Image (spheres, rainbow, N blue to C red):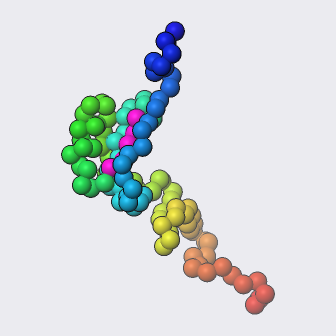
Amino acid sequence: MNEPGEPSPHHVTQKPRKRTDATVSDFTLMVKVPRRPEAGRVFTAPEDAEAHQYAAAAGGAVVPLPLPPPNGYTVGPNGHLIPQPAATCAGMADLSEPIDDAAH
C-alpha cells in the first residue's frame, strides 16, 4: 500500500501545459505511446524537437497531424467527417441530386 502523498500506480496526474494562445489547429504533431493512452501528448511545429525527445523518453512515436479520415469517410467543406457516398452499382441511377417526387 502507498503512503499518504505517494502517487498510486493507478492514478495519473497531468499538469497543464503553459500554452495560452494555442488552438487545436496549431497542433501538428502527436506522440502516441503504445498501451498508455494517458501518456499521449500533442505539440506545435516549433515544439518538434521536444516532441521527439518526449517520444524517445516515453517509448512512443511521433505522428504528424492532422490524421487522415478513417476508411469510408471524407472531410466536408466545414472540416467535419462525412460518410463517403456509396458506390453506384450497375443499373442504378448516378444522380448528383435527389429526385423530387412532386415533379413526377
Q: How far across and how far down the image is residue 41, in percent?
A: 38, 43
The answer to whether residue 42 is magenta is yes
Q: Using the image, determine if residue 41 lies above or below residue 44.
A: above
Quadrant in the picture for the C terminus: bottom right
In front: 94, or 17? 17
Q: Residue at x 39, y 56 (%)?
A: 20
Q: How far across and how far down the image is residue 98, in percent?
A: 66, 79
Q: For the magenta stretch, what is the residue range? A: 39-43
In front: 91, or 7? 7
Give the left or right position of residue 54, taking residue 7 as reference. Answer: left
Q: Residue at x 43, y 29 (%)?
A: 35
Give the left or right position of residue 87, taking residue 100 as reference. Answer: left
Residue 96 visible in the current orientation: yes
Residue sticking out furthest to the front? 4
Q: How many marks?
A: 0
Q: Using the image, determine if residue 41 lies above or below residue 68.
A: above
In front: 10, or 15? 15
